[in-house]
Amino acid sequence: MAEIDTARIVYQFEYEERLRCAFIGAGGHSYRNIYPAFQYAPIDLCAVCDLDAERAAQYARIFGAPRHYSDHRVMLERERPTAVFIVTSYDPDGRVQALDLALDCLSAGAHVWMEKPTASSTAEVAKLAELAQRANRIVVTGTKTVFSPVMRRAKEIVSSPEFGGPSSIFIRYPLSMPAFEQRTSLVEMNWFLDCIFHPAAAIFHLMGPIDRISHEWEAKTGASVTAIRFQSGAVGALHLAAGSSPSSPVDRTEVVGNNANIVIENGTTLTYYRPTSARESGRVGSFLVPTESAPLRWEPEYSYGQLYNKNLFYLGYVDEIVYFCDCIVNGTAPDRGSLEQAFQILQLFEAYRRTEPGRWTGVDAK
Ligand SMILES: NC(=O)c1ccc[n+]([C@@H]2O[C@H](COP(=O)([O-])OP(=O)(O)OC[C@H]3O[C@@H](n4cnc5c(N)ncnc54)[C@H](O)[C@@H]3O)[C@@H](O)[C@H]2O)c1
């Protein structure tokens, strides 16, 4: 598996070889989080395209691309990029704009990195996968959560023999789900589709494929709680905590193994409660377990101007982009942010669209 070496980050200008890349989209998120991440990736940005030509020109100037376009087809034809980054939005009918753009890029022979959501249905992802395979190109979706340093360490821990295999998971993420009757509308489901990729990517990454789900739903806020059974036999709960205060940390994830558990809080803090001996009830006067089996806790310091305490790094943006570049350079198929994972996430999305609260439904892996 291609991996960013977080112990020593390479600056863009230090790479001996860089990939010829173009960019479609000059919007808010890409300005904040994607173009700036290129400073640490083997990328030679040749052109920027946006429907708003003035924006495209400004972004090209700011982020060092020599040319800009307002029509992606013209850009693909003239630039012949090795890879294209796509960070666009939604059509008024709720369609994911990036889907058709990605199909055009693959047809033009370019690898594709696209922001989530990859698409709005499993059928659309299957179409992308088929073309990617025919064109012998890769597609990576920007599922930053599974690229973040804490998630990478969490995955290592839950996969280690001493953890005993993940037996259950709890994930909290604030997200409102529309009423069941509204879920046939892609427009009503737009925000849910936009955000479900974050907790869902983490669930599949840590626990593997889902067998079945059943959810309960609250009408005032659209909050929900989903009971999950995984194909491994493990169980889980997804608490989509709509109604939370905006001042609250967003996420909390806990995975339990066998005599061990991990907790990820606020995207940056990881605690590993390691296996340790049971305490005799009513007889032990100190809560301190032996040092060799004591909990481990990691959290960033925020006082120094370092890379690790920059959101581009601790949220996983640089890693997801360098990973994509590594896959292209090494000719390896992605296993994080892959179309298989996007397919699984959209299977979950479709399960919510077709199933009323209180009923079980299968979420089959491909
Ligand atoms: N992973 C994250 O942390 C995160 C955070 C925020 C947003 N996002 C995702 O990023 C994407 C963009 O969000 P945003 O808020 O920046 O949107 P935005 O509306 O600010 O930007 C989208 C840009 O795409 C351009 N565009 C649309 N169709 C185009 C086309 N055919 N050719 C050229 N340009 C085109 C628009 O003109 C616009 O400038 C969404 O998919 C969203 O889900 C991800």
Image: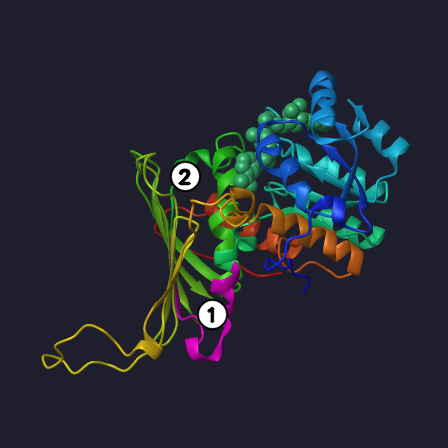
Image coordinates of residue 125 in percent, x first then y, are 67, 47
Q: Quadrant of residue 23?
A: top right
Q: Which residue is mark 1?
A: 157
Q: Residue at x 75, y 27 (%)?
A: 49
Q: Residue at x 86, y 40 (%)?
A: 108
Looking at the rendered structure, the secondary structure element under dot 1 is helix
Kind of residue indicated by mark 1: Ile
Please tell me the numbered disc located at residue 177. Answer: 2
Was residue 39 drawn as part of the magenta stretch in this picture?
Answer: no
Looking at the rendered structure, the secondary structure element under dot 2 is loop
Q: Is mark 2 within 8 Å of ligand 1?
A: no
Q: Nearer the viewer, residue 353 or 304?
A: 304
Q: Is residue 327 visible?
A: yes
Kind of residue indicated by mark 2: Met
Picture quadrant of ligand 1: top right
Left or right relative to 308: residue 172: left
Q: Nearer the viewer, residue 227 or 179?
A: 227
Q: Quadrant of residue 110?
A: top right
Image coordinates of residue 25 in percent, x first then y, are 68, 29
**Quadrant (top left/top right/bottom left/bottom right) for the N terminus:** bottom right
> What span is in magenta?
152-171
Estimate the spatial distance between the alpha carbons at disc 2 and disc 1, rounded to whole Å: 32 Å
Does the CB distance between marks 2 and 1 fall below 8 Å? no
Q: Nearer the viewer, residue 67 or 348?
A: 67
**Quadrant (top left/top right/bottom left/bottom right) for the C terminus:** bottom right
Was residue 163 drawn as part of the magenta stretch in this picture?
Answer: yes
Left or right relative to 92: residue 166: left
Tag nearer the camera, 2 or 1: 1
Q: Height in image: 221 above or below 139? A: above
Instruction: Find the residue positioned furthest to the right.
Output: 78
